[in-house]
Each structure stands twice: as C-alpha cells, then as structure tokens.
Amino acid sequence: MYVPPHFLEINTDEIKAITQAAPLACIVAQTDEGLIANHIPLLSAPDGRLIGHVAAANDMHRLIATGQEVLTIFRGHDAYVSPNYYPSKAEHHRHVPTWNYQVVHVYGAISFQYDDHAKRAAVALLTRDHERRVNGPNAWKMADAPTDYMQQMLDGIVAFDINVRKILAKSKLSQNRDPQDFRGAISGLQGAGHDALAAEMENRLPKPA
Amino acid sequence: MYVPPHFLEINTDEIKAITQAAPLACIVAQTDEGLIANHIPLLSAPDGRLIGHVAAANDMHRLIATGQEVLTIFRGHDAYVSPNYYPSKAEHHRHVPTWNYQVVHVYGAISFQYDDHAKRAAVALLTRDHERRVNGPNAWKMADAPTDYMQQMLDGIVAFDINVRKILAKSKLSQNRDPQDFRGAISGLQGAGHDALAAEMENRLPKPA
C-alpha cells in the first residue's frame, strides 16, 4: 500500500479502533487457483492474534496452506472530497479532488484449526464481542441454542488464527491541509452525509486549551 | 470467494449499483514483494473497463506488470446479524449469529498509461461522476484550476484501466431466511443503526400486489 508519511497511521489505539469499528475484514491470499479473497469478521485476541472462522464449505482452508502468509484488510469509512470544500479554493483554485479513508493492512501467517475446542473458542469470542455491542444485557449466547444444533453448526465451520507479522495502516483524513481547508473538508463531508468520517477528522482538530 | 448459491449475485444492475455506491475499490496483486493492496476510486467505463489513476509515487505501477491480472474488490454495507433478530428464535432457538454484506470481486488485467491524454481522460471521467453526485450544478471541473497547476498534478499521476475477465458477486442479505425472520433481520438492523443495509434488504421483500 502506498502511504505518504503524512498519512501513515502509527497510533496503535487508532489502529485498534479502526479494526474494532469495521471487523468484517477481507482476507487475501495467493493460491494455486490465483488470488482469492474472503470477507470474514475477525477479532483481535488479547495476545494479538486475529481470530475467525469460516464455513467448512469455504475452499479457503483447503487452498491456503497452514502457515501461509495472508493479507488481511480492515477498512474504515471513506468518501470523496471535493475541491469545493476548501475555502482556499476560492482564492487560488489550486486544488484537485481526492478521497479520504482509513485502512489497516495486516500481514501474517494463517493457521486453520479443526478441533472442537478451537472452534468453540473462536465462536464464543466473536459472539460475545458483537452481542455485547448490539444487545448488551440481552446478549445471545451459544448456550441459548440446543446442544445438538450448536454441535451441527460447529461441525460446519473451521476456525483459524492469523499470527500478525506486520501492520501497515493509513489514515487519509485531509490532515495535510491547512487548518481552514481541513475544517472546510469536515463541513463539506458533513453536508454530504458522511458524518462518521467527518467525526474521525474532527477528532484530529486541536483541542481547545 | 465462497459463495453459496443462495447468496450468488447475478443481477447485473445490482452489481453495478454496488460498485457505483462504493467506488473506493481495493486492488490486490501478487508481486515480487508479496501481496499488495491499494484502495483506489474506480469508475466503470461504458465499454466495461474499470478506470482509475494512482500517484506516480505509488509503487503499484512498478510492482505490477502491465497486463498482469489483479483482483479488484468493491464492498457495500455490512453488519452483524444477531440471532435475537429472528422471531422464530423464541420458538426453537436454532439460530446462530452471522454477518450480512455485499461484495463484488472483479478479476482482470491491469494496464498502466503514462500519456497525458489517458491521464486527463481518467481524471475527467472520475471527477465528473463524483462532482455530479456531490455538487450537482456547482460541480468542480478540471478547467477551474490554473493550467500550470493542473499539469503539475497530472504529471504526478499514472492512469490505468482494468479489462474485466470475470466478476463474482455476493449479496449475503438474509434472503435465505423465512419471511418472518427476514423481516426480523431488517428490523433488527434498523434498530442497530444499519439503515442502508436494511434498505438493501427491504428492496428484496416481495412487492405488494
């Protein structure tokens, strides 16, 4: 990924926030059948591994060798940024369109797990995380489902983890603009309905003393 | 990509709609330096080619040979779907969490163009498309910028097109659920603030006679 220094994201809290806010990652691998990609919700375990599971019918666990390096892509909000958003455009017209976005690229070796323990752990971790966000105290739990049904579901999946070797993250958020154009880009994006992206940019405004 | 038959998206209008609504595509390639990915806004030309441009400083046009096949991924809205959303959960509890999303994978050979004509055409096509959406009659045009500045900007980019060989699209939108659970998933996602994804699902409800 091309990352000019001013867009390189090195804040580990921010990188974590991007991956947690957009857990549906795209896992890419080179295989004997060419490039393949699958979108899969992932969770970052306390030890740093990425945890997930796929349908047993998903060929990725047959096409990708255990231990092979894959590229995992998390992606935040994005939007087109018009030159019209910059107040200084009216003065000198020296602006062109661009696109703002945040992405996190993770390189690491994937390992597939076929044992019941690993599969239960992966499902439990992911479920707990998402249910807590969506349903709070009414969170669905694996134990809510009948034992035979849950076992059947677990039999239909394969768990995996990715041992992170390298992270490359990019926050392209107009932070290279002068303050008035930066604020203009925020307003413009708000006007175009991109509130979440604009909020991400507002977080980078200098805090009032 | 793993696509069970009930999630295979074959509606060409829908595939076009996904790519137009989420033009920031992820272009993936296998190179001598391993897997690389770059997020780049793309436009589908009338002849079907995907058109884009990158910074000349972006190594992808050096790492990827002209004519090499790349995988281009467009991604629509996505969200976690809780078992709690399904009314039938209360009856039999035979549900597990899942994730809804739409993605379009495009395989095709990329060709880079270094001539001024191709670069101007790529910028003009993309700019016109996005400015029309964002600014309507007040659309920014390349001609708004001073000639020397625009030339400098064009000198800093490389244009490319992708000749589409194969498209594989997936609409994972709970359409395999029974009608009451499908409607429940829509309501649940609306309740969780995923209105755009819910609207995409509502479009698949049977129309009243």
Image (tube, coloured by chain):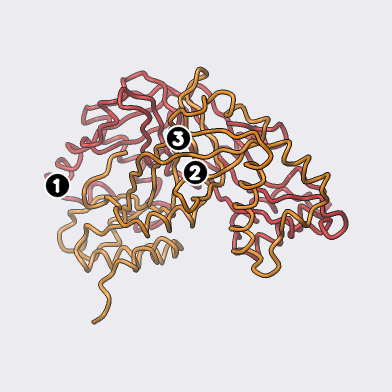
Chain colours: A red, B orange
Quarter of the image for residue B159 reads top right
Q: What amino acid type should be assigned to the residue bearing mark 1?
A: Tyr
Q: Secondary structure at mark 1?
A: helix
- Secondary structure, mark 2, is helix
Using the image as rendered, state which of residue B101 and residue A153 is in the foreground: B101
Q: For the residues marked 1 and 2, what is the alpha-carbon distance in whole angstroms?
A: 29 Å
Is B45 in front, or is A23?
A: B45
Residue sitting nearer the eye, A165 or A71: A71
- Name the residue that disc number 3 marks: A44
Task: Kindly indicate the quadrant of the structure image that contains residue A121.
Answer: top left
Q: N-terminal of the two: label 1 or label 3?
A: 3
Residue that mark 1 sits on: A149
Q: How many marks are shown on the rendered structure?
A: 3
Numbered label attached to residue A20: 2
The residue located at (72%, 36%) in the rendering is B156
Tell me the CA gap for discs 1 and 3: 27 Å
Type of residue at label 2?
Gln
Q: Circle 3 marks a residue in which chain?
A: A
What's the distance in space between the residues labelled 3 and 2, CA to CA? 8 Å
Q: Kindly state the secondary structure of the residue where label 3 is placed.
A: strand
The answer to whether the residues at label 1 and label 2 have Cβ atoms under 8 Å apart is no
Q: Is residue B117 left or right of residue B162?
A: right
- N-term mark: 1 or 2: 2
Is B206 left or right of B33, judged from the image as shown?
left
Badges 3 and 2: C-beta atoms under 8 Å apart?
Answer: yes
Mark 2 closeness class: few <14, some 14–19, many ≥20 residues within 10 Å = some
How crowded pointer 1 is (Cα within 10 Å; few <14, some 14-19, many 20+) is rated as some
User: Residue A164: horizontal and vertical position, in percent?
Assistant: 47, 25
Q: Amino acid at mark 3?
A: Ser
Q: Is residue A61 left or right of residue B159?
A: left
Quadrant occupied by the N terminus of chain A: top right
Q: Chain of mark 2?
A: A
